Image: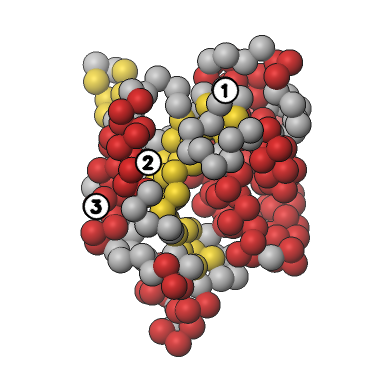
């Protein structure tokens, strides 16, 4: 497993290193979590390094995700910390983003014990899954939705405003922070109750590091990104129609 070099030490002059904070984010998911947090990379004073899950393997035509359990996340973060000494004084932090889902409690406890060893290590869990954090971008109260399992949460998310798309959800992060923190009845306990998530703590840390002005600029950049994607999509569709007509 190859880790990326710490971007702010490689790309930024040494005299400016102290102006940057590294957010090293280890997650069990290989799609939604990296997709959501990676756009913050490169924003003024922030470097995001995703400690990626192990590569998926093809087995008899079936895709099997490996390395997603808390024990595998713990293995990856230990390797990362051994290789890259995070500097708390510079604002470096390690975030482990996992679900309750189906994992054994002892694995979650082991990961929490590791994170509790340093103030700049944080374990943020969603119960039952990361989709709870995403739902709080749109909704303040999830109790009436009948969510009991991860599949329930994913179904509800897919049915709200056309489903999840990170570019449209990221501008609502402040709403999600407010909604999720209000719903968290035990903010000092690392383990959230059903329909609760601790991921708002990571969102809040990113926002505080950016500041209000930078976050507003970030939202504008996402709107422009969405416009560019829409234009490219329209061009491809028109091109496809023109090809069909010429073929006739």
The mark nearer the N terminus, 2 or 3, is 3
As rendered, which of 5 and 57 lies closer to the eye?
5
Looking at the image, residue 138 lies above or below residue 158: below
x, y percentage for residue 188? 54, 42
| Res 15 seen here | yes
Q: Residue at x 41, y 53 (%)?
A: 121
Percent x, y for residue 10? 37, 74
Q: Separation of disc 2 and disc 3 at Cα?
A: 16 Å
Give the secondary structure at mark 3. Answer: helix
Q: Nearer the viewer, mark 1 or mark 3?
A: 1
Describe residue 90's horizontal placement relative to residue 211 as left or right.
left
Q: Is residue 225 above or below residue 184?
A: below
Check disc 1 and report the residue beneath it.
194
Q: Earlier in the sequence, mark 2 or mark 1?
A: 2
Image quarter of residue 29: top left
Which numbered tag is attached to residue 79?
Answer: 3
Tag of residue 139: none
Where residue 78 appears, x then y in whole percent? 26, 50
Judge the density around disc 3: few (<14), some (14-19), many (≥20) Cα neighbours within 10 Å. Answer: few
């Amino acid at each position: 497993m190859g880790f990326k070099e710490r971007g702010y030490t490689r790309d930024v002059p040494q005299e400016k290193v102290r102006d940057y904070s590294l957010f090293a984010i280890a997650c069990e998911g290989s799609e939604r979590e990296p997709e959501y947090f990676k756009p913050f990379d490169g924003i003024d004073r922030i470097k995001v390094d995703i400690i990626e899950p192990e590569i998926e393997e093809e087995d008899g035509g079936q895709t099997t995700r490996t390395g997603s359990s808390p024990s595998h996340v713990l293995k990856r973060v230990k390797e990362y910390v051994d290789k890259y000494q995070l500097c708390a004084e510079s604002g470096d932090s390690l975030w482990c983003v996992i679900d309750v889902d189906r994992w054994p409690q002892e694995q979650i406890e082991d990961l929490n014990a590791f994170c509790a060893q340093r103030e700049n290590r944080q374990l943020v869990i969603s119960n039952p899954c990361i989709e709870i954090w995403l739902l709080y971008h749109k909704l303040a109260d999830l109790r009436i939705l009948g969510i009991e399992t991860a599949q329930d949460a994913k179904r509800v998310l897919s049915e709200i405003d056309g489903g999840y798309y990170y570019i449209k959800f990221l501008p609502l992060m402040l709403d999600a922070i407010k909604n999720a923190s209000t719903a968290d009845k035990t903010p000092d306990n690392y383990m959230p109750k059903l329909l609760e998530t601790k991921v708002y703590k990571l969102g809040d840390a990113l926002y505080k590091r950016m500041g209000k002005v930078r976050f507003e600029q970030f939202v504008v950049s996402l709107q422009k990104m969405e416009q560019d994607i829409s234009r490219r999509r329209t061009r491809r569709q028109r091109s496809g129609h023109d090809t069909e007509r010429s073929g006739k």
